[in-house]
Structures are given as C-alpha cells and as structure tokens.
Amino acid sequence: MTEQKEPYAVEMLHITKRFPGIVANDDITLQLKKGEIHALLGENGAGKSTLMSVLFGLYQPEEGIIKKDGKVVQINDPNDANALGIGMVHQHFKLVQCFTVLQNIILGVEDTKHGILQTDEARKKVMQLSEKYGLQVDPDALISDITVGMQQRTEILKMLYRDNEILIFDEPTAVLTPQEIEELMQIMKNLSKEGKSILFISHKLNEIMEVADRVTVLRRGKYVGTVNVRDTNEEELSRMMVGRDVQLVVDKKPAKPKDVVLEVSHLTVPGRTKTKNAVNDVSFKVRAGEIVCIAGIDGNGQTELIYGLTGLTPTSGGTIKVNGKDITGSSIRERSAHMSHIPEDRHKHGLVLDYNLAYNLVLQRYFEPEFTKAGFLRTGNIYKYANRLIKDFDVRSGQGAHTIVRSMSGGNQQKAIIARELDRNHEVLICVQPTRGLDVGAIEGIHKRIIADRDAGKAVLLVSLELEEVMNLSDRILVMHEGEIVGELDPKKTTTEELGLYMAGAKRDTPKEAE
C-alpha cells in the first residue's frame, strides 16, 4: 500500500460515542484525503450522522481524537468547526423559519456598521455563489414559504458563504428532484476540483458510485471497511452495509384493480400567495388493488394536492370521495378514519418530536377503547402495541418505546411513521416520499409492505420524486406540471426519458379524466 504523502485533511481516530442504552460509534476511524469526495455509508441508525456531529462539534466523543492537517484539534462546538474551515449541511435543516434566505445564510457571520446590519455585500456574494454553483434561490423569500428543495440549497449556500474547505453533506439528496440531484453531483465534483474535501453521507448506492472516490461503511455503530469506489459495485456495498444480500429491484405481481376507492373530481387548491392556484381542476381515480403514482418536479402542486386530500389545507373547489362517501368537508380526524398518510415532512406533519416513540405510534389511535378508558390513557396497552410495531418494522432506538423521538436517526423516525400508518385500518394509503432517507435494506422492506397493502385490496396513492421508485413501484403514473395533470403513463410501456419530458412540461396529453 502506498504511503500517504501529505497529511489527511481530517482524521477521526478510534472515535467512541455513547448515548443512554446505545453505543452510537464504537471505535471508528475515518480518514479524509484533501480534495476527495469520501462517502459514508450505512443503514439507518448505523452512526453516520453521530460521527459527523462529533466532527462538527455538536457532540463530544468519550474516546478518540480528531486531527486536521496532521495536527490534533479540539472541536468543542460548531464555532470551533467553522474556525477550522469545517461546514455541515444537516439532514434536518438548521434554519430559522421566520428569517429570509439571505438572513439565514449570513446568520452568525453578519457585517454590521454602527450596530446596523449591512447586507449589500453579503447579497452580492450570495448571488455570485448561487450563480456559480447553479443554486438559484430568492434571497428575500421566508424559509417558511419555500420548498424543502430550496431550503436544502440555502443550507449549501450557508456553507459556501463561510468559505469552508471541509464540507459535510448529511443525506443531501434525500429531498431533491432527479434534476437537482444531478446538479448537486456536479457541484460536488466542481468543489472537489477546487480543492475542497467532501464527506458525503448517503444511502443511495448509485450516487456514491457516481460521485465518490472512496467509501467507508458502518454497520450498527461499528467500522466495516473503506474501499475505493472504482474497485467495488452496488451489490458488494449493500452487502457490507446490511450484512446480507439485498434485492435492489422491486418484485411484484401485476395489479388486479377492482372498484374505485378514491375519486377526486375537479379539485382546486389555492397557492400560498392566493394569486394562483397550486392545484388547478385536477381529477383522477384510484382503485382498490393498485398503486397510482403522482410524479413531477418538486413544487408543481403535488404537496398542495396531498394537503388538500388529507385536510391540511382547505380546498377551494371540487370533491373528494372515498368509497362513494363525500369527505370534502370532513375534519382531519374523520378523513384519517379512511386514509393513512405518510407525510412529506416527517418533523412538521409526522411526529411530535418531544414525545416518546410509544406515544408517537398511537397518535392517530389514542382515543380508541384499546388505548383509552374513561378519559385516561391505558399506558400498558400503548407500550405493548408500540413494542409489537418496533419489532415488526425493525425500528431501532436506544431505549425502545421510551426513546424520545427527537433523538432517533431520521431513517428510524421514518420507519416509525410507516409502521403507525400501515398498521392502522385504512381504505386509502397516501405515501409521500415514503423511503426518503432510508437505506437499501429498509427500502426493500417498505416497498414489500406497500405492495402487500395493494395486494390486500387497498388503494395506494404514491407521491415520489425518485424516478426509480416511480417506475418500479407504480401500476399507473399521473404526471403533474404547474398544478395540473398533464399525462397518464404505464410504467411498463414508458421510459424515464419520456417521463422526464412530461415532468418538465415539454410534453402533455389531455388525460381522459385520468382514470
């Protein structure tokens, strides 16, 4: 083996980090070369984000040392990390919702004159960076008003604005569209050419194969190995990650659709600004025993359509029927008696982060006789039920059902929501980005469960930005562009290229009421 000539940009040597009930990092060593893209791969809860949080100063390790450019450094907090040129884009964004994009980017490194914030130079630098790296943002938009994809861009610009030379990307593509992912891959390559060193946490093997130079694999908090990407393949990496062979292609029988379960007619949902409809006169049907996928580039009305169906946003026209019953004016609780909903934003609409896992697993059912008696919660039954779901869906957490959900990994938070929603009685299953942030082993399991739900006679409405998931999982594809359904495609007869043309608005049909 050739000796490393110059010192590593970063070395994390024998790092151990413990939390109550769990060793998150168990004697892990990671070495990042200057100018390389180094991927960190592992299942949900393998300890990847924890290791990066140690490097960024959010956690202090019980054992081990960190070296930068060959010298031992002490990183007590993110300010120390930033001073050393280390920046991090977190999986769950660290943005102030009521601030603008520009205010978030400069927060902590603001220029002031006589106590007054000076933003002209900052704005110029942000616009230059966004132009250079293809990260177009509206600097004056409030974070609370922009899409998840735009928030991701804001986080990346925040890091570039600080001229960081070691860049940590924690699941950066989990919320991006295929087009944005391609752009980000190019950005990362350009950054490494400029001499930046990148640590890239991902579950997506195809992205690692495309962009990374080397990959380090963790499994259940332990170091498995580091390999050169050019010397490996997706199958070997998935085996290292999960410890078994993983089926990378969805295995499903042809659908046998029966009666119409969900019928949406001429649905209109106002946009955020109220000047334009986010969903405009949309009609479609989903039958029992089929998976219908709404595909589209992020921000074309899919989110608002689901909000309208589930009651999170009021509709301004049209009807929603489930098994012939009009639920257009029904409350969210009444709707949830018919629908299970895996939401797009697990923190905002999926979980109460400071509740424990058991209470999150009964959020939709706590009022049922099994869990409540004479107005009091039956905690014994709640924990018994939670323990069954944790076991059935392999939800990993340090203290089982008692774990505070905020402390769990993103992937295990997602598994908890999926467990809760799939286990409930429902006629319609609405899944929005159901495998976001999940590893290949968990994706395989979730896809099998969604297909089993379909085969049990449920109507499944899927919204996904993952073209591979759209093509593999759906029985019919409806494409949304600018708030309208512009085409209906058969996944067995179409290509990703044709799907991409519809998504971009370059091609459209007048669907036959999208039946």
Image: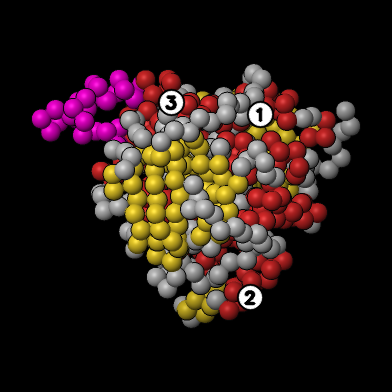
SS of the residue under disc 1: loop
Q: Position of residue 188 (x, y in %)?
A: 72, 52
Residue 244 found in image quarter: top right
Task: Give whichever of 218, 305 is nearer the camera.
Answer: 305
Task: State which tag comes first along the sequence, 1 or 3.
Answer: 1
Q: Tell me which amino acid carries mark 3.
A: Ala
Whether residue 284 is visible, yes or no, is yes
Span shown in magenta? 361-387
Q: Is residue 43 depicted above or below 294 in this figure?
A: above
What kind of colouring is applied to the model shown?
Answer: secondary structure
Residue 469 found in image quarter: top right
In the rendered structure, the answer to whether residue 326 lies left or right of residue 496 reads left
Task: State which tag comes first along the sequence, 2 or 1.
Answer: 2
Q: Residue at x 65, y 38 (%)?
A: 492
Residue, disc 2: 124
The circle on residue 62 is: none
